[in-house]
Structures are given as structure tokens and as C-alpha cells.
Image: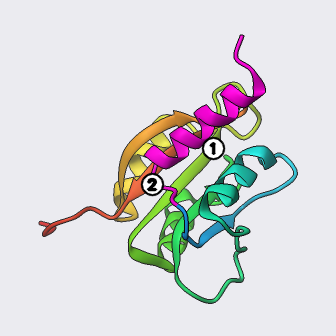
Amino acid sequence: MPTAATHAEAVRAMLTRLGIKPGMTVQSIGDDVDSDEEFAATVAEIAGSPLVDYDFEDVVDAVLLWHREDDGDLVDVLVDAVVPLTEDGVILLLTPKSGRVGHVPADEIAEAVPTAGLQATTTVSAGSDWQGTRLVTPKGPRR
């Protein structure tokens, strides 16, 4: 069984692979009492500064977007999350895992992501109750 230290190291490594780096400004949107505080704290630790909230009025390098089935239209939420991103910014879409309250079906995510002008690159387990999908703006010319 992995130790707490080993688990924390694995989470840090996963977040680094997802594009979370020191010096980043990371915005957290949609966090609530059910959000994984330990996961968010690890993101802040890697970035080297506290997460900023929805009211932050500058550009950000990454967005942690906590989204549940009843949180509104996913396309609209994704489009809003893109607005403050830097050109190379990433969105980590965090949704409850299958069987958890608020689960967002994979086909809904797959349909919403390109509609919002984004591309999914990786999906990972982001704690015991959440999964994370890394979203980026596609590079190159669009047809």
C-alpha cells in the first residue's frame, strides 16, 4: 500500500505532466465543499502561490474547473474558462467520477470540448472522487 508521501509525490508528478509548473497563476472555478482540497492545495504548492478565484481580473496560466452535472451548460462554462487564459494556458476540467453525485458522462464532455474550441489531451484520476481532463486550445490553423 502506498504511503502518504508516495501518494503526494505521484500527485505532484501527475500535475507536472498535466502542465502545472512553478510560477504559474492558477484560477479555481466552481470549487465547493465537495472539491478535493488536498488536490487543489497540491496545485497551489507546485505553482508556488495560492489559487486565485473567479473574480481575478488578470490573465492566468491554468484553470482548475470543477464541474458537476447540475452546474449548467458545460460548453458555456468552458467558453467562460478560456477567457482569462494565456495563449498557452491549460484547463484542467475536474468532474466527479462515475458513480459519484454530479458525474458528467464522458460523451457529454467529448461533445462539449470541441464545441468550446478546445481539445482534450489527457484524462487522469484526480483523487478518490474526481477525474481530471486536460484541455488546451488546438494549435495550428483551424478549418
Q: State whether residue 123 is above or below residue 113.
A: above
Could you tell whether 40 is left or right of 122 in the image?
A: right
* C-alpha span from label 1 to label 2: 18 Å
* Whole-percent x, y for residue 92 in the image: 53, 53
Q: Look at 54% across and 46% down and name the residue there.
A: 15
| Res 95 quadrant in image | top right
User: Disc 1 vs disc 2: Cβ atoms closer than 8 Å?
Assistant: no
Residue at the (16%, 67%) spot, across then down = 142
40 and 138: which one is in front? 40
| Nearer to us in this view, 99 or 57 | 57
The residue that mark 2 highlights is 19
Task: Residue 4: tell me if it is visible.
Answer: yes
| Residue 105 lies in quadrant | top right
Q: Is residue 18 magenta?
A: yes
Range drawn in magenta: 1-21
Taking the spot 63% from the left edge, 69% from the top edge, the residue there is 27
For disc 2, the neighbor class at 10 Å (few under 14, some 14 to 19, many from 20) is some
Q: How many marks?
A: 2
Where is residue 38, by image quadrant? Answer: top right
The residue type indicated by label 2 comes to: Gly
Give the crowd class for mark 1: few <14, some 14-19, many >=20 residues within 10 Å. Answer: many
| Residue occupying the point 15% across, 67% down | 140
**Disc 1 designates what residue?**
95
Q: Nearer the viewer, mark 1 or mark 2?
A: 2
| Main SS, magenta residues | helix
Colour scheme in use? rainbow
Residue 128 visible within the image: no
Estimate the x, y position of residue 3 in percent, counting from the top left: 75, 20
